[in-house]
């Protein structure tokens, strides 16, 4: 048997807008220029089919300004000095503003190999929210409904 839901709307897997996300994986890595970074995998909360998003938080170099803002939204105090354990971020929740970024490219495999195509990627919108596309879970963005607390769930009547 295969379970299906014919009422479910088709989707391209891109969750655009402001939504609550949970850190599922976090690991230390280095950028191409050798700067430290965190690679974080998020999963959407409150969606019928969870969407995944990978973001890279720079801990040094040119991207440090963005990385610092993202870390603050994830609960790292602004004046913190010391070692961070990437595993401490797993399970943390944060509001993310996302948009689809398109860029031209050349297909490297499949039936379109060698032909021009447009790549579409889900990205954090750094021009939104308080911390460059991020906002702490407790600081619910204006006009956003908390998953599980819609109008029907908030009122006992």
Image (spheres, helix red, strand yellow):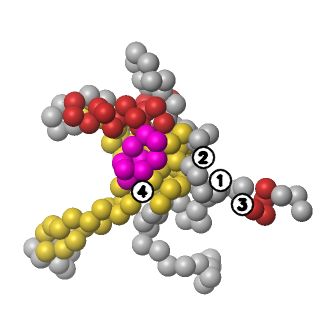
- Marks 4 and 1: in contact by CB < 8 Å? no
The residue singled out by tag 3 in the image is: 150
The residue singled out by tag 4 in the image is: 98
The residue singled out by tag 2 in the image is: 140
Distance between mark 2 and mark 1 Cα atoms = 8 Å
Name the spot of residue 87 as percent of width and height, x first: 47, 31
The residue singled out by tag 1 in the image is: 146
Residue at 49%, 35% in the rendered image = 74
Identify the mark nearer the N-term, 4 or 2. Answer: 4
Distance between mark 3 and mark 4 Cα atoms = 21 Å
- Marks 1 and 2: in contact by CB < 8 Å? yes
- Marks 4 and 3: in contact by CB < 8 Å? no
Identify the mark nearer the N-term, 2 or 1. Answer: 2
Name the spot of residue 105 as percent of width and height, x first: 15, 67
Q: Relative to 77, is 152 above or below?
A: below
- Marks 2 and 3: in contact by CB < 8 Å? no
| Residue 29 visible to an observer of this rendering | no
Residue found at the far top of this picture: 82
Identify the mark nearer the N-term, 3 or 4. Answer: 4
Q: Where is the N terminus found, in terms of image quarters?
A: bottom right
């Amino acid at each position: 048997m295969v379970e299906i839901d014919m009422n479910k709307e088709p989707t391209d897997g891109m969750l655009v807008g402001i939504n609550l996300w949970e850190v599922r994986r976090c690991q230390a890595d280095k950028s191409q220029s050798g700067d430290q970074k965190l690679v974080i995998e998020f999963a959407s909360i409150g969606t019928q089919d969870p969407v995944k998003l990978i973001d890279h938080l720079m801990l040094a170099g040119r991207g440090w300004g963005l990385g610092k803002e993202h870390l603050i939204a994830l609960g790292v105090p602004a004046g913190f000095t010391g070692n961070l354990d990437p595993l401490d971020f797993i399970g943390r929740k944060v509001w993310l503003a996302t948009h689809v970024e398109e860029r031209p490219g050349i297909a490297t495999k499949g039936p379109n190999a060698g032909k021009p195509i447009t790549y579409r990627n889900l990205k954090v919108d750094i021009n939104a929210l308080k911390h460059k596309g991020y906002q702490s879970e407790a600081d619910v963005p204006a006009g956003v409904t908390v998953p599980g607390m819609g109008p029907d769930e908030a009122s006992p009547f």
